[in-house]
Image (tube, grey):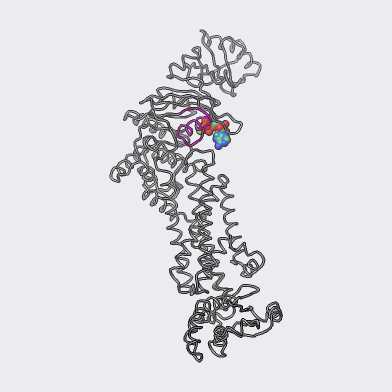
Amino acid sequence: MVINVQNLVKRYGNLLALDHFSLQIEEGEVFGLLGPNGSGKTTAINCILSLLKYDKGTIEIFGKPMRPDAYSIKQDIGIVMQNVAVFQELSVQENIDYFCGLYVKDRQKRRELVEEAIEFVGLQDFRKFHPKKLSGGLLRRLNIACGIAHKPRLIILDEPTVAVDPQSRNSILEGILKLNQQGATIVYTSHYMEEVEQICSRIVIMDKGKTLATGTKEQLKGMIKGGETLTVELFGLKEEQLEAIRRLPHVTGAEYDGTRLTVHCSGGAHNLIRLLDYLRGQELSFGRVYAEPPTLNDVFLEITGKHLRD
Amino acid sequence: MFLHVFTGRLKCLTRDKLMLFWTLLFPVVLGTFFNIAFGNIMNITEEFSPVKVAVVESAGYQQNEAFRQTLDAVSQPGDGQLLIVSVVGGEEADRLLKSGEVDGILEVDGEVRLTVKESGMNQSILKAFLDEYAQKSAAIGKLLRENPQADLSGLLDDMGKESFVNEATLSGAKPDTMLNYFFSLLAMTALYGSFWGLRNSTDIQPNVSALGSRRSVAPTHKMTAVLGDAAASLVLHVAEMLLVLAYLIFVLGISFGNQVGYVLLTCLVGSVTGISFGTFMGCLFQKRDGLKTALLIAVTLFLCFLSGLMMVDIRTYINLYAPVLSYINPAALITDAFYCLYVFESHTRYFLNIGILCGISALFCLGSYLLIRRQKYASI
Ligand SMILES: Nc1ncnc2c1ncn2[C@@H]1O[C@H](COP(=O)(O)OP(=O)(O)OP(=O)(O)O)[C@@H](O)[C@H]1O
Ligand SMILES: [Mg+2]
């Protein structure tokens, strides 16, 4: 087991940031930590890395207890922080070299690793740039390069792709998968379902410091009762009509933004037909209609919504 | 690993333009400004006027042949005259001192005691004269016993005359007053080392900055990281102080006496104090970044103000009414250390200053350590 967290409790004053949080991650996994803002993802990671003292619980990495002075464990971890952590006065190349140098002493080897990292995040044209002159997305990429240049066994990424454009994001996600294929275990936190769905082999959904569900994405989707999402483009839906739709059988929720009606359904057949029948009965004309199978988004909505927010 | 941290740090700090401005350019500009303001005073080469002193008439004084002879020798009218001595009764001496007609009172009963009302160049000369006399009194006594008619001038030649009378005549009016500004300026430069200390402490604490967290998860031993940073900032800051010093000496022509080694030691110790002070402040006020810097500037300038950076008389008042402040104010201690090197031949007071500065630095370091250990982050 690469990471084994048992019953972690962390309080900030009165706020319970982690509530008996447990986590097991196996070698070679791409593990997704999914949760809304403020759910305790960063707190959990900081505790795992011994950056934060915690009130209760045990943390083991590579089978050994993690402590602030467990330098041999730290040697094998790469971390990409949620907040960009680079030196403003050092260039892209110097920054990567500095952080890589904290792990790798050999200069020749380091030069190769730095070069590889620069190519990995696609900053070849910005080697001599200083962080101040980089755009937000490029800065994020530098942040990533600083964390992974030394080729660690375990890589923890805390929302690494915030502010990165879709193409770069995809190339970063691909890169992460490549690192995984080279043998690294990945822990990836995000509140973007799509990303997590795209790369993670196993996922934990957390909210308010608690683990709500763990499993592969298929397992997670299986947890909700085969719900689907129906989307209908239409104008002029009235509030009471929306209310009526919400009361239709199997409908768990409905939103309307003026042009588009989104209806979430739990399992059961003929949901779409029933909805369209209702709309015709109200003499509403509609444009395109589509039905989507459940996504992690639905899973998330269902679990967090039902168990916590209500 | 230490070397890697050290060089990386040095690279960062030497490129921090804003901090370089405050720690290097600002003192240079201020020094130039002082020099322009005092330029006129410096050029006046007025005659040095001998120091007026009252000696209390007593049996002790009458019996102390050596001392009387010495006083005689240094109060001979002429170029080398150091003192103007009036031998008076105890009460009269007090009155003269109070009214400012003399700068000090000498009393003899076995040993010689000096009473002064304020501190300044003349008082310092008296003190130095007595220190010298104490050192040489045995030799003078012996010489007089062997040959009552002996000429004391040989022995007295190096009795401080060279070291301060010459310096004093150089800048006529009130040399200590003007020089104090420059000494104090150097003290300010030293304490501005606190900016580097503050930066160090920000960049290493995981709860203060992202960089701090990032570096805390690396397998660098915490002590290596702290010492690497500290060494880099110390090297840089001492270099800055030497540049400022060189500018004051070689470009502006300010004299710091001729004890180069000790002047450098003062720079080093002052720099250590400044950096550890900043580190401590950084640990004390972990959040509120803007406040920290503002507070640091304010505190440093206030301490320098007390040491006479803006108004030299402040220092005199403090020595008079709250002398303890001078012993705990690092700026005053650094200023006084330079002053001692310039004025006195003996190093007692100088080493007292340096010793206290070292003590204060040690306290700041200890305080920083305790504060970091206490915080809710586990990483140390
Ligand atoms: N230093 C702190 N002091 C007090 N409360 C904190 C502190 N850091 C985080 N919190 C609180 O702890 C909770 C969890 O925060 P955390 O940063 O772990 O969330 P997160 O899941 O990483 O959110 P995000 O997606 O926004 O990054 C939040 O309610 C937050 O307000
Ligand atoms: Mg977070």
Q: Is residue B65 above or below residue B351?
A: below
Which residue is at the front of the view, B375 or A239? Answer: B375
Quadrant of picture, ligand 1: top right
Q: Is residue B340 above or below residue B236?
A: below
Residue closest to the far top = A269
Residue closest to the far bottom = B149
Q: Residue A28, how many percent across, how many down?
A: 35, 26
Residue A205 at least partly seen:
yes
Which residue lies at the image location 65% right of the left edge and 64% below the top edge? Answer: B322
**Is A187 placed left or right of A56 in the picture?**
left
Q: Is residue B165 above or below residue A261?
A: below
Q: Residue A190, how many percent across, how many down?
A: 47, 29
Q: Residue B58, how many percent across, how many down?
A: 65, 82
Residue closest to the far left = A108
Q: How many marks?
A: 0
Residue B46 at least partly seen:
no
**Is A114 placed left or right of B375 in the picture?**
left
Which residue lies at the image location 54% right of the left edge and 56% below the top edge? Answer: B360
Q: Is residue B202 magenta?
A: no
Q: Is residue A44 magenta?
A: yes
Q: Residue B57, how many percent across, how many down?
A: 65, 83
Q: Residue B54 lies in what quarter of the image?
A: bottom right
Q: Residue B35 lies in what quarter of the image?
A: bottom right
Which residue is at the front of the view, B17 or A152? Answer: A152
Q: Which residues are magenta?
A: A38-58
Which residue lies at the image location 56% right of the left edge and 9% below the top edge? Answer: A274
